[in-house]
Image: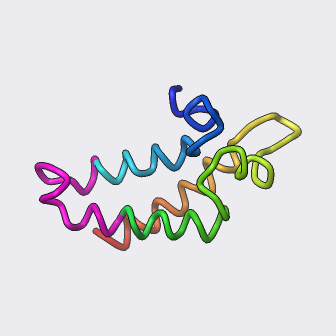
Amino acid sequence: AGFSGGLMAEDLCGVIAGGVATLSVIFTQNVAHQSPELKQAVKSYLEKVDAHFGSRLCCDIKKSHRDLETDSCNPVIFENAKLLDQVIQAFR
């Protein structure tokens, strides 16, 4: 819940923060600096996010991707999940 609303401040989109957290769980062996796959996976993921959403900021992403009828970020969540899955599959 703390990721919601751009970390409660319309800053970094919570699904992006959650995506990096997910990659961290999957690709960290012991510690981050000993996990070269993690750095590359995060870089790839953020490049995909930037290309798809055009921003990493909640305030920008919700303008073009939020479902205004239901007042929901579900479209952002589902689109991000596809991007995240692409990165996970590419680095496994």
In depth, the one of 25 and 50 nearer the eye is 50
Viewer-closest of 67 and 7 = 7
Q: In percent of the image, x 72 and y 51: which residue is there? A: 60
Q: Could you tell me which residue is drawn at 34 percent across and 54 percent down?
A: 23
Residue nearest the observer in this picture, 17 or 80: 17
Q: Where is residue 59 in the image (x, y as percent from the top left)?
A: 71, 44
| Residue 14 horizontal/vertical position (percent) | 55, 41
Q: Does the magenta stretch include residue 54?
A: no
Residue bounds of the magenta highlight: 25-41
Q: Please name the predominant secondary structure of the magenta segment in the image.
A: helix
Apparent side of residue 52 relative to residue 16 in the rendered image (left or right): right
In the image, what residue occupies the spot 54% across and 45% down? 15
Q: In which quarter of the image is residue 50?
A: bottom right
Looking at this view, name the residue that lies furthest to the top.
1
| Image location (x, y in percent) of residue 66 | 76, 46
Q: Is residue 4 left or right of residue 20?
A: right
Residue at 40 percent across and 51 percent down: it is: 20
Colouring of the image? rainbow
Expressed as whole percent of the image width and height from the top left, the position of residue 2 reads 51, 27
* Tally of numbered tags: 0
Horizontal arrangement in the rendering, residue 65 relative to residue 34 (left or right): right
Q: Is residue 38 magenta?
A: yes
